[in-house]
Amino acid sequence: MEGLIRSERLPHIWCAGCGIGTVFGSVIGAIQKSGYDLNKTAIVSGIGCTARMAGYIRLDSFHTTHGRALPFATGLKLANPELKVIVVSGDGDLLAIGGNHFIHAARRNIDITVICVNNLNYGMTGGQLAPSTPFGAKTTTSVTGCPEEPFNFCYLASACGAIYVARWTSLHIRRLTNSITEAMQKRGFGFVEILTPCPTSFGRRNKIGTALETLKFYHERSVIRNDIDPKEAPIDFGNNIVVGKFVDTERPTFLDNYQLSCKNLIGDWPDFEGTIVPENQAG
Amino acid sequence: MADKAVMTGTYFMNGDYACCEGALAAGCRFFAGYPITPATEIAERMSRRLPELGGIFIQMEDEIASMSAILGASWGGVKAMTSTSGPGFSLMMENIGLGICTETPCVICNVQRAGPSTGLPTLVGQGDMMQARWGSHGHYEVIALAPSSPQEMFDLTIRAFNLSEQYRIPVMIMADEVVGHMNERVVIPRREEIEIVGRRKPKVSPDKYLPYHPDPDGVAPMANCGDGYRIHITGLTHDERGYPGMDEKTQAQMVNRLIGKIVNNRDKIIRTENVYLDDADVVVVAYGISARSARQAVRDARARGIRAGLIKLETVWPFPEALIRDVAGRVRALIMPEINAGQMVLEVQRCAGGACPVHLVSHLGGSIIHPATILRAIEDSIKGKK
């Protein structure tokens, strides 16, 4: 692991009890496990606590602008398809300011692996509400409780066409590392969400409290439901927290289809020669 | 055609298409863009031409994504560009700043329409000139070129790519709707007649490489992603290693170098076409489509016995301070026509420093400035009316 850490950059910026360090360890473990050429593996991030991972890993690493890791990574991957490109991002970075890019990168099936650390709030700026903040949770911009419903990121990723979707907590280190490895080894848009504690910005304003309390909560409440429709797996703090691998499928990547279009092999639309019987004539 | 990238020959072509051909001749193999009038034809032609050359065309979800994607592609080792107009140019600003801070070669063609806001989408404007200079936050230098014909759309797009690689900076082509949509004769030379600047690669091994340690000209050699150098690139203030440094010393070093690499090389970057300056009593300073009107006005003035001259700005940023200062000391007036309420004229006034009057011929957008309007300003300035 040491060879992959820019140790001269330590100490890191993450708070005591933060879950990003654990995820960082899993990302590094997965990169080693996956066996890709380290000189052809790149990390792209946006802005936020999680985005700082890019600065601590000894790979080609790009710390870009807030929300824009995915379009930057899209350009990087398409310009040099030999590269294995990993995006690391927080929930606000990836799905608030970067939400538009997320749905389109997934739809296009750009061949990149996206790791999303979900700590339920904007940590770096001191704890504001995010698209992941649970309804009613207190943040510095929702002191009487968050009045918005959060996203189910895994359901969104799946609906947009991600070919691999999984959710874990930062306690599921072995499963998480395996999931990131699997996602990297697949061709296409892979998405792994990790629930982590953020004691400094989020925990202390809510009953979830310290990092240890958060982890204990995740330990007691998380249930593994592999292969269920992620629609059925919202993050519901009043019930069990559903984790697992939800999607593992295949479809052509952007580059696969682009190559077809370059050869004019996409075919005609609409294809009236198809075999589908209109519903009103069926049976 | 033997050479698919360089379409050697003489064509009747619009400026947007000529821009594409210039880009492809310069080696551009990645285009990310979003449809917007009057720049859409660039994206359309690139979508047809790049697949023929093994390049990538991608229509992104917006201009923010387009700008981000070309930065990523440039680090992937490919010459990359995007094109847009006012509203899209505004959306690109943050990531143009990232390109400047991370010193990423790329080209942005802004086919200007009249603003503000949605403005006159199909009609000409030159209102983004100061936005090109100052549109992204913080202090930095830029390179921007202003073509005034389809031929110059071809020529200056090649130059834009060359400058972007030479100085590791996003280069802006500040075209306009008339130049983009006008069809004119465009001569595309043979490949061997086109000067191409390639990327300056590191000469040292990865363990000795510092991504932002400059050569004597202020520009650092650039390792591409995947070359084995394992670089860290950030928009945070960074040191020569590329590592963030949150202190005033690192900030001063980085910003001074970003500014210095352009300012100290400006004599190599700045190009102007100077017409009849030797004996001129009054000089019109103009760029883009307005330089076409200005040239006609200067000819008409000469025909009437007025010693008028023209400085046509090919490079608008960095601004040719020394030339304007010199000329201002020898003429009775300087005149600048532009399709805005007065932007580059502020630079002309600054450089003239009161040595002579500086008159703006302003049009607020929707049409070109008629040569007769500029001629009248020339005549008035000589008569001392203004």
Image (cartoon, coloured by chain):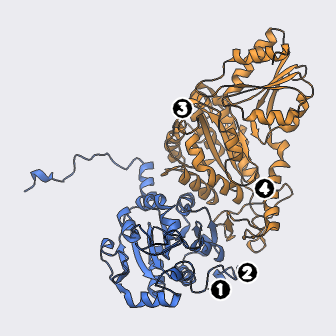
Q: Nearer the viewer, mark 3 or mark 4?
A: 3
Callout 4 amino acid: Leu
Name the chain under label 2: A
Q: Is residue B180 left or right of residue B278?
A: left
Task: Tell me how far mark 4 sits from mark 1, CA to CA.
Answer: 34 Å
Q: Mark 2 points at which residue?
A: A8
The amino acid on which the numbered mark 1 sits, given as a three-letter code, is: Glu
Residue A109 percent across, percent down from the top left: 43, 62
* Residue that carries the numbered disc 3 in the rendered image: B120
Q: At label 3, which amino acid type do we have?
A: Leu
Lateral position of residue B9 relative to residue B103, left or right: left
Chain painted in blue in the figure: A
* Label 3–label 1 contact, CB within 8 A: no
Question: Where is residue A211 drawn, in percent x and y?
Answer: 52, 87
Q: Name the disc covering residue A2, or none.
A: 1
Subunit ID for the residue under disc 3:
B
Secondary structure state at the residue bearing disc 3: strand
Shade representing chain B = orange
**Mark 4 → mark 2, Cα distance in angstroms:** 25 Å
Residue found 58% across the figure and 43% down from its top: B83
Q: Residue B258 carries which label?
A: 4
